[in-house]
Image: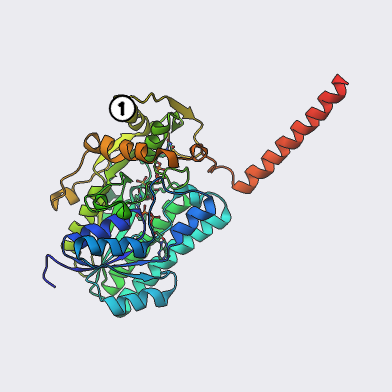
């Protein structure tokens, strides 16, 4: 392998970021193989939701890719919480880099109840631990590119650095991991992963890059746009749909945009086309043995309300009238706060960001309009609540219903 073309394993390559990345890397001439358990398709089924776009089964996607481009991407079906799956993959494919997308990635999913919190943390932490042990045993020089998240940092009242902060305390100074204040059991699982990875870089000399990614938007990349069979996910339901995708689906249907609370929640965002380029930049510029490197992977930051206004303006140009609703925030998060996160390391490596203002109409609202008939408006309103588990809410609803029934019975008797 020369330095510009590498062998890359994409764990979670049937998912949103993984599918776009696998195709992009394959097109750049890298040799790519996907590992996926398809559990995400099962989670959609469990929740009774489906992506706005009609995604095809992975074997069909890969056949079409090969027919159109002559490039082969191999695939392995398996769950990386099973050690033999990841060990078998590393032994047979022998990658130079492994990109790890294969996690449960929804904050609301992890907050449904105890079972969902536990399954999220087991899936994510155990999968990553297995991968670390397999790398140590079978591929110690392989570069781990791990998808972390900006939400690991929370929303502190100081600038957010890229992974590390210099602290002076009682006259002494050190560079230490940036403090973490995650906002869901999912975000916590990413923090646990980061600790396990940094520990294994330190004790075993593994090499890793943690990409603390912001919220990704968009569905089209040059590769997925080649044929409808290659189309990527566009999640808009309250559990897996991210905010901008949701607002665009809502605008396409003339549904009010569901801003949670005051809408001052600020996050970092990036176009899916920048996600795939960042991944390649990390692979082409690997961390050194023993190094645990952290890049903040986003291009612009917005408040939720700013996003709603952008969508409203863009929708208006298409003749769509869109209202903004402020719903009680189902999450526990600051609705107004300071936010200034550094994100220069990927730009220094050559990232040229796509800006939201350039892609919103093409990549988002137009896609939402094209598949408008598949939108289920019943998936717009938030059901998962950070303060109450699903069972507690059910019990509360039952109590309310019985109170109402009793009141009704009472009312009847009065009327009678
Ligand atoms: P996704 O749910 O679309 O894809 C994840 C894929 O991983 C799915 O195909 C799923 O089947 C697979 N998977 C999950 N657990 C697995 C396991 N144990 N073994 C094998 N396969 C497994 O998610 P996504 O949006 O593509 O996110 C990918 C990664 O990027 C996640 O780690 C997520 O935390 C991170 N991330 C995503 C975003 C975003 O906005 N989508 C933002 C920041 C970080
Ligand atoms: N929000 C609304 N209205 C909605 C949906 C969301 O106001 O209809 C708000 C949320 O309350 C939150 C913000 O929008 O303040 C972002 O929410 P989101 O659902 O778009 O994103 P989040 O839950 O943070 O998770 C997503 C991905 C996750 C990734 C994370 C990056 O699902 O995998 O890790 O973005 S970050 O936010 O930087 O941690």
23 is higher (above) or lower (below) than 402: below
Answer with left or right where residue 309 lies relative to residue 46. Answer: left
Q: Is residue 172 visible?
A: no
Q: How many marks?
A: 1
Q: Residue 39 appears at what percent x and percent y?
A: 45, 61
- Residue 232, compared with residue 10, is above or below; it is above
Taking the spot 19% from the left edge, 51% from the top edge, the residue there is 346
Left or right of 99 on screen, residue 235: right
Badge 1 crowding class, 10 Å Cα cut-off, few under 14, some 14 to 19, many 20 or more, is few
Q: Residue at x 33, y 28 (%)?
A: 315
Where residue 46 sits in the image (x, y, percent)? 53, 54
Question: Against 399, is 67 above or below?
Answer: below
- Residue under label 1: 318
What secondary structure is found at the residue carrying circle 1? Answer: loop
Q: How has the structure been colored for display?
A: rainbow
Location of the N terminus by quadrant is bottom left
In this rendered view, identify the residue nearer to me: 6 or 223.
223
The structure residue drawn at horizontal position 20% and vertical position 58%, both measured from the top left corner, is 280
Please, which residue is most extreme toward the top here? 415
> Which one is in front, 154 or 257?
257
Percent x, y for residue 95?
24, 72
Viewer can see residue 75: yes
Image coordinates of residue 106 in percent, x first then y, are 44, 50
Q: In which image quadrant can residue 312 be found?
A: top left
Residue 192 is drawn in which quadrant? Answer: bottom left
Q: Nearer the viewer, residue 28 or 368?
A: 368
Q: Quarter of the image containing the C terminus?
A: top right
Which quarter of the frame holds ligand 2?
top left
Q: Nearer the viewer, residue 373 or 289?
A: 373
């Amino acid at each position: 392998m020369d330095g510009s073309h590498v062998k890359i394993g994409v764990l979670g390559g049937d998912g949103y970021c993984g599918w776009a990345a696998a195709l992009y890397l394959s097109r750049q001439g890298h040799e790519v193989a996907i590992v996926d358990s398809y559990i995400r398709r099962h989670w959609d089924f469990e929740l009774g939701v489906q992506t706005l776009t009609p995604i095809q089964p992975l074997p069909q996607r890969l056949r079409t890719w090969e027919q159109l481009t002559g490039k082969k991407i191999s695939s392995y079906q398996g769950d990386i919480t099973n050690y033999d799956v990841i060990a078998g993959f590393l032994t047979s494919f022998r990658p130079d880099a492994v990109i790890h997308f294969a996690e449960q990635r929804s904050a609301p999913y992890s907050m449904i109840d105890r079972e969902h919190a536990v399954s999220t943390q087991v899936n994510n932490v155990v999968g990553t631990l297995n991968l670390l042990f397999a790398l140590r045993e079978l591929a110690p020089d392989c570069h781990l590119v791990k998808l972390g998240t900006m939400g690991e940092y929370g929303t502190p009242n100081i600038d957010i650095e890229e992974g590390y902060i210099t602290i002076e305390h009682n006259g002494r100074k050190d560079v230490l991991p940036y403090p973490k204040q995650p906002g869901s059991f999912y975000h916590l699982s990413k923090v646990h992963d980061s600790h396990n990875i940094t520990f294994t870089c330190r004790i075993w000399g593994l090499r890793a890059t943690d990409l603390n990614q912001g919220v990704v938007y968009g569905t089209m990349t040059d590769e997925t746009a080649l044929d409808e069979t290659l189309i990527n996910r566009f999640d808009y339901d309250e559990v897996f749909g991210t905010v901008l995708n949701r607002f665009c689906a809502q605008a396409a249907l003339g549904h009010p945009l569901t801003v949670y609370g005051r809408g001052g929640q600020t996050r970092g965002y990036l176009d899916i086309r920048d996600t795939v380029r960042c991944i390649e930049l990390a692979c082409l510029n690997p961390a050194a043995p023993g190094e645990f490197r952290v890049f903040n992977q986003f291009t612009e930051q917005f408040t939720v309300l700013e996003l709603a206004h952008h969508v409203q303006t863009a929708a208006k140009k298409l003749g769509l009238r869109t209202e903004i609703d402020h719903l009680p925030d189902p999450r526990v998060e600051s609705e107004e706060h300071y936010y200034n996160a550094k994100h220069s390391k990927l730009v220094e490596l050559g990232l040229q960001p796509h800006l939201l203002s350039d892609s919103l109409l093409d990549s988002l609202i137009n896609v939402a309009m094209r598949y408008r008939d598949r939108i289920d408006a019943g998936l717009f309103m938030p059901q998962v609540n950070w303060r109450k588990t699903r069972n507690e809410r059910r019990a509360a609803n039952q109590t309310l219903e019985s109170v109402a029934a009793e009141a009704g019975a009472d009312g009847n008797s009065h009327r009678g």
